[in-house]
Amino acid sequence: MITNNMRRKRRQFDDDADWLPQKDRLFVLKQPLPPSQPPPPLPPIPEHKTRTTDKEGLDRAYKTDNGFYRDPEGTLHVAGTRGGLLESDWIENYKVYGPGLVNKLGDMLGKLESGKVGLSDWINTGQTFDIESTVQYKALDKYMKDNPNEVKNFTAHSKGASVVETWMQNNPSFTGYARFYGKPHIDVLGSEKFKDFLNQARQDRHEMYSTFWGPNWLGQAGENFENKEQDLAEWLTGFDNVKGVKEKHQLRLTGPMDPVTVLDNSAKEIVDPTWINHLSEGGGHYYGNIADLYAGFGGTDGDGYLPNTAPPPTPVPSQVGMQPVTPDPSP
């Protein structure tokens, strides 16, 4: 009885449904869809210069006879100290860095004992190392004279960084940039980094007055007044004699476990958790795992940091539309 009732209800529901096809309807195949159009051809891949990472350049520099390697873009990579602890390079280091560091610390201790030390003594970043007497400095000076206008920028490691910085100081007409790894440098308070902050404050102030006040005497007077206030503050504290890292067209890089840069608080620190795997190459003083993040001097800030210089994703056709494909970030 129940089964018959259910059959009658199902038959009545099917007869009343307007969404079902009519009974005894002639079945006809639909016409096939036109063939799909092929995807448009991809745009040609632009040809870029081959970028040499700082690690690749420095690796090659360490293998050359003179410790220099110039890549196709004109960046000269300069190696640091080579050989054993009792070989000529290291013996020269003892003579150059040892007395300079001892004299600097002795001078500060003497001033502390006499009570005559001032703020300007702490922020003074003048280096006391006799770099110009080294064999590598003389070799670099000769290389630059023998290859005029060929070197556009520098990267250097350790002692090589000291050599390049001294050469740039003695040749102010050189307008290129330099990136240093593990450079011995004395800047305990981070004075050069703070001077960069002061210089940036001047630039931001100029942009603010130019934007809101325009080229009128009132805006110029306000900007000049604040600049004079900063000039006075820098003169009183001794920062007028400090030159910022960016102002010198340089970038100093280090890792937290590098003993050579422990007195340099203006260096940019990059965490390298793998330093312990390179004890035979210098441990925390090893440049490789930091230097492979930089190549050339492009990017938004001109610092060559590879994540800032990677090209945007290139769209390519796929079954579901145009999808961005991230290119290989390796140079």
Image (cartoon, rainbow, N blue to C red):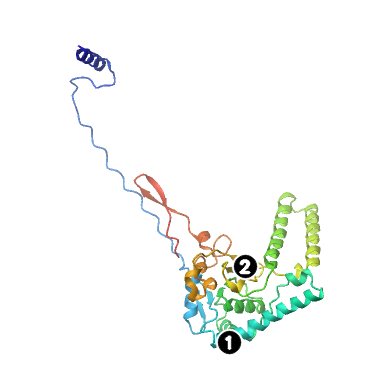
Quadrant of the snapshot with the C terminus: bottom left
Residue 61 place in picture, x, y as percent? 50, 78
Residue 251: % across, % down: 60, 68
- Location of residue 28 by image quarter: top left
Dot in front, 2 or 1:
1
The residue lying toward the viewer, choosing from 226 and 8, is 8
Label 1 SS: helix
User: Label 2, label 1: how many angstroms apart (C-alpha)?
Assistant: 26 Å
Farthest front residue in view: 113
Q: Nearer the viewer, residue 86 or 307?
A: 86
Q: Which residue is mark 2?
A: 267
User: What residue appears at the point 70 percent right and 56 percent down from the top-left corner?
Assistant: 204
For badge 1, the amino acid type reads Ile
Residue 73 lies, with reference to residue 141, above or below; the image says above
Residue depicted at 74% across the width and 53% down the height:
209
**Can you identify the residue that label 1 sits on?**
91
User: Which of 38 and 244 lies nearest the eye of the viewer?
Assistant: 244
**In the rendered image, the vertical position of residue 46 relative to residue 145, given as above or below:** above
Q: Residue at x 28, y 18 (%)?
A: 18
| Dot 2 crowding, Cα within 10 Å, few <14, some 14–19, many 20+ | many
Q: Please give left or right for residue 235 compared with residue 141 in the image.
A: right
The residue type indicated by label 2 comes to Ala
Please tell me which of labels 2 and 1 falls first in the chain.
1
